[in-house]
Image: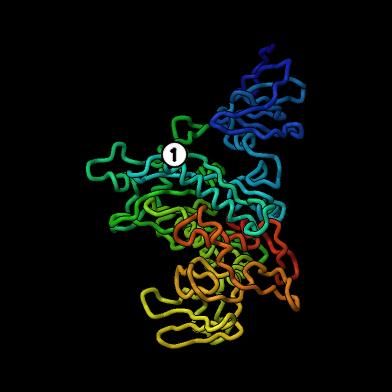
Amino acid sequence: MKFSLPVLGGFALLLFVTISPPCHLANGFVMSQETAAESTRLWVDASGNHKLEAVLLGVENGKVRLGKSSGSEITVPLEKLSLADQQYIRLPADPTIWPNRQSYRNSDPWLVENHDRIRVMRPRLLVINFSNNRDMPWIRQRVDQTIKALAESTRYHGFADPRALEFVEYEVAKYIDMRDVPPPAGKENRNSSRYPRGARPGTTQYAPFYSNEFAQAYGFTDPAKPDRYLNLHELINTGLVHELWFYGIHDDEVAAFESVEFKQFYDDQLRPIRGKHGPAGNGHPDDMPWSGRSFRITWFNTDRGLGCGMENFGHALEGVANSGAIPYYKRYFDEFAEFDLDKRYPGFPVSRLYGIRMGTDDRAEYPDATTLVLQLDGKPYTINNYVAMGGNVHFPPGARGHYDLASPFVVKTVIENYRLRNGVGGKDAVHDFDPARFRQYERLAPDCMGPWMIYWRQCMPGYGNRCVDDHGKLMKNWWVFLFY
């Protein structure tokens, strides 16, 4: 039974005698079952003109139930609330999950302040398909497979610990079909006419992703103005989207960077540097705009497999380190990925084995388990007493050249004991590098460097790690830095 009440601030108010449990929201959102601990907060309608102090009681059939201090209750259609209030309803109150009701946008200061509290991250993806030869069920399946592979890769030491927890669990905010339907004759195996082609063949424009034209394709209605759509800048700043993946065909007309990111910069105390941001991906387009928060865009070639896509994410990690955006992360990632060989071994001609040029006689050799000989420009450079760290995207420990997953050499490494200080003399325990560790993931990410990528990432300091930093403190979970 319900009774109409006077309208306050434009809200349609309804008094309920019985209380119904919360359930599913509109648009597929599910409300957290945590309303018992709710406190009074200020609610604002979509226009921004009407406000009301009330407690969230629950949601049913797209209707939000609010409790006033007088004891009466009101219902408001979810879509009539401001985006901030809609986010509040959708997100969990639990501060160990991100995004949550306190923080739901990239680069929030909250992430720095609560870095060590977070036990799982569930960033929201915008996924776009430009491939005329891949239907949406195919895209959905590939995205689902990629999300599962990435989640597995964030299980710290998951290769050996069945109790290890997934940390990054992507969720899809929306799939966008930008194919030509049907494609013009002769374009069945090409990218859509809507693909943002660059002026030069084989290039991609990134500014259109932020345009009002693409906003219409995205279809996120602006609650304040139902006749317009939110563009990517707005989706980023409202926390509706944290990352963008787009799928296309790599051909003579189109190619894109594997992963690009505009990143907020931080000082060595992890404090954001006001007004400083810059490229932090594997390459960077000149036309990618800054939205005021870090944002990453990843490209996938639909003619290649899931494992090849995993390389893109590995290069994204390398890109953040190369950018210097987060000095703390760079300090340890460079060490783990062996980006500091010239510092660790003075006189060595390159900082990393990426200096080996493909298509030449350059190569790495390992006369024994603790000796590295780099053949560069016909000259040998030797490191004695060499123990590999964690390797990088192209070079697992013992690799002779780029993409070498079949090296016959057995080398010593600390990849599984990085900064655990569990060996002789308080150093990391040394062990033989065992390719069987990554081969267990050949079914999950079978092609390119996919299996290696999953194992490699599991060896990085993640959630629950006991690694030790330079100051004797527990190492921070590296995955949180993705959304700094």
Which residue is nearer to you in this view: 132 or 196?
132
Q: Which corner quadrant holds the C terminus? A: bottom right
Question: Position of 135 compared to 171: left or right?
Answer: left
Q: What residue is rendered at 67% in x and 39% in y? A: 92
Q: What residue is rendered at 48% in x and 46% in y? A: 143
Q: Image height check: is 301 above or below 234?
A: below
Which residue is nearer to you in this view: 463 or 272?
463
Residue where numbered disc 1 is placed: 218
Q: Can residue 262 be seen from the camera position used here?
A: no
Query: Which quadrant of the view contains residue 24?
Result: top right
Q: What residue is rendered at 56% in x and 73% in y? A: 338
Query: Which quadrant of the view contains residue 116?
Result: bottom right
Q: Which corner quadrant holds the N terminus? A: top right
Residue 136 at x, y = what percent? 41, 39
Q: What residue is rendered at 64% in x and 39% in y? A: 91
Color encoding of the figure = rainbow
Question: Position of 21 compared to 300: left or right?
Answer: right
Query: Which quadrant of the view contains residue 285?
Result: bottom left
Q: Can residue 38 be seen from the camera position used here?
A: yes
Residue 68 at x, y = what percent? 73, 25
Which residue is nearer to you in this view: 159 or 484?
159
Q: Image height check: is 468 above or below 141?
A: below
Q: Name, please, the residue furthest toward the left.
A: 185
Say which element carries label 1: helix
**Count of numbered badges drawn on the protein:** 1
Which residue is nearer to you in this view: 39 or 190?
190
Crowding around mark 1 (Cα neighbors within 10 Å: few <14, some 14 to 19, many 20+) is many
Q: Inspect the image, locate mark 1, and give the three-letter code of the amino acid beneath it.
A: Tyr
Residue 226 at x, y = what percent? 47, 30
Residue 353 at x, y = what percent? 49, 75
Q: Image height check: is 388 above or below 252?
A: below
